[in-house]
Amino acid sequence: MTTLTTEPLASLLDRLFEEAETASSPAIAAIPRDERERLMRSKTEYLDLYGRMKDLWLPVSRETGALLYMLARSRGATSIVEFGTSFGISTLHLAAALRDNGGGRLITSEFEPSKVARARQNLAEGGLIDLVEIREGDALETLRTGLPATIDLLLLDGAKSLYRDILDLVEDRLRPGALIVADNVDYCPDYLAHIRSAASGYISVPFADDIELSMRAA
């Protein structure tokens, strides 16, 4: 038995995934597809875009959530950084791994205040709020200081165009063997070019349809 598969977290996750499946965002639906694709790649308009997406769930899939838990458990992670909290589904999976690893700290950043409030509510209901620090605001500022000396796992699942910028903020704190999970990574070609470069110090492979899984080799 694990924290992930027992109460109160198991039924909470079932309910959140069901809610996410039926949710919609009229504001995003109104943006033409080509314009939405352009905004996803923009390094200057991400605050406007994600402000419009404040009602959009943007959750990881059940399979990705389970993967995050397994990676954090198998790594024995006690220090995790997450870019892009949204409503906290991925955060719950990572915090569950910390609990089952004996404790630790998860720092996560979210731009939208309403999502921060809901994520805190979900983490409290799941009995994991004591392991998580949610930093509200632009992650380029909130993750610039106050990070742990070493990081075991980094999840990139916020504004896709900023993945390389966020990695630059935390890179010198990633311990050898640290894992990086980046979702929807095709929207950030400069991140992909860096993480896949033979000179970067990473081993990196595409995983599933839209995830890049990387390990800090040295």
Image (cartoon, rainbow, N blue to C red):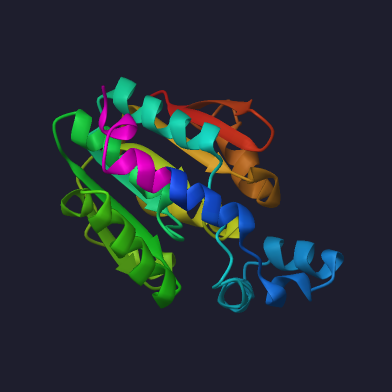
Q: What segment carries the magenta color?
A: 1-13
Q: Quadrant of the C terminus?
A: top left
The x and y percentages for residue 91 are 37, 48
Q: Looking at the rendering, which quadrant does residue 4 occupy?
A: top left
Q: Is residue 54 left or right of residue 1?
A: right
The x and y percentages for residue 183 are 58, 43
Q: Is residue 133 magenta?
A: no
Q: Main secondary structure of the magenta part?
A: helix
Can the viewer see residue 3?
yes
Residue closest to the eye, 194 or 96: 96
Can the viewer see residue 93?
no
Q: Looking at the rendering, which quadrant does residue 142 occupy?
A: bottom left
Q: Is residue 145 left or right of residue 65?
A: left
Q: Which residue does the image show at 85% across and 65% down from the upper left?
A: 34
Q: Is residue 3 left or right of residue 189?
A: left
The x and y percentages for residue 14 are 45, 43
Number of dots carrying numbers = 0
